[in-house]
Image (cartoon, rainbow, N blue to C red):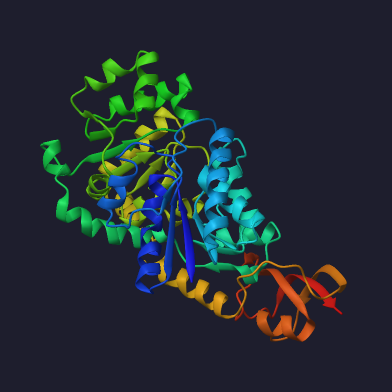
Amino acid sequence: MKICVILGTRPEIIKMAPVIDEINRRSHELLLIHTGQHYDKEMSDNFFLDLELPKPNYNIHVGSGSHGKQTALMMDGIEDVLISEKPDIVLVQGDTNAVLAGALVAQKLHIPVGHVEAGLRSFDVSMPEEINRMGADCCSHLYFVPTEESAINLALEGYLPKDIFITGNSVVDTCFRNLKIAENSSTIIDDLNLDNLNNIITFTMHRAENVDDKQRLQSIIGALMELKDFNIIFPIHPRTKKTLENFGLYKKFESLPHIHITKPIGYLDFLVLISKSIIILTDSGGLQEEAITLNVPALTLRYNTERPETVTAGGNILVGSDKDYILETANKILNNEEFYNNMKNAKNPYGDGNSAVQILDIIEQSYNNGDLSISSPDNIMTRFNVKMHNIDEDITVSDFEKKYNTTVRLVYKDDKMVFPVEDLNIKDSTVLYNDYSIK
């Protein structure tokens, strides 16, 4: 097979590294497109080398810009490559502009799209990432979702369960893979020269709703100023630094002895740093996943999250920008051993690190079955109804669909919404299904 992978940002490259490894391990032809969304050496060529990944076949060099302009430039460049290369499938990951651009272009060219980390929803349409997630899912053919909750999100939106696959999250594969590389090369802990390595908080903040809102920013920075029992490591984004300076917060903040502001840290060093932290304080989405994978409690500086499983599991707490809540929770982690251990030992909802293997198994099976094609139907539909019934017979989802010529969309069992995997027994359940027939 010729498998195209489209990447635009560091988080995409990081999470797709195990999938790229698996594509190469199985001797498929890899077509790697980098949109050039991060346009300096650290964010592009050198980063692929650091992660021991092949150099991209194409770099579109879109650079920075508004969402609309950047997405349009990506679409233009990606379309030229896909028309020329004609891959069997295009893989995109996550919720960036590159994901939306790649999925939309591929679908328009009738090339099937596999969306890795599909189905995530924050239900906050003010976030550009939410629009990208929803748009990419509209254009996808195969959905590789990290959890049952993500699968249910897609089923509720009308996507067919047969196209949705719960594979766990490749972030687990990635953390295990890259931490091994990092531990052999990173000197970050020695470089920090800290007296106490048992009380590190890794702090990141970049989202506009925090950085550009003076009241929220003051509240968050105020909390950190009072957390004097911690060593707070803050790899600062240039835009965040500029905003802190504009609001008159930077000088006082960076002068405090427990605050350690650094320039942005390379990914491998950063992975070692968070693995050694007692808490991760962040507004990042991906860091919520990495934290629970590395057994580090996370406090998320947001009011909603597209990773609710981390909260449900107990490894992540949404604290918003509430100064008192941030202080209360951070100090509780430091001083209450039982509370800390419960967060640290929260069960990872994202699997055990074999997502890439599952994803390639599914792609190969779909290809061998002739399912990786987008074409007009050959049969005429004579009936289509959406129905909901209570099921009394002892029967699985698969057998129910065959017996009654239906497609089960969702199951309500034991007062809980359940994703309809094929071998699920639906006796004594309420089932939402499509009733249809073709001529």
User: Measuring 31% from the left and 18% from the top, which residue is drawn there?
Assistant: 250
User: Which quarter shows the C terminus?
Assistant: bottom right
As drawn, 211 above or below 419: above
Residue nearer the viewer, 41 or 322 = 41
Residue nearer the viewer, 416 or 86 = 86
Percent x, y of residue 365: 53, 78
Question: Would you say residue 305 is visible in this rendering?
Answer: no
As drawn, 138 above or below 363: above
Percent x, y of residue 134: 62, 49
As drawn, 331 above or below 115: above
Percent x, y of residue 421: 60, 74
Percent x, y of residue 242: 36, 20
User: Measuring 29% from the left and 26% from the top, which residue is drawn there?
Assistant: 226
Which quadrant of the view contains residue 236? top left
Judged left or right of residue 291, residue 431 is right
* Residue ranking furthest to the right: 382
Residue nearer the viewer, 430 or 349 = 349
Judged left or right of residue 317, residue 139 is right
User: Measuring 71% from the left and 60% from the top, which residue is drawn there?
Assistant: 158
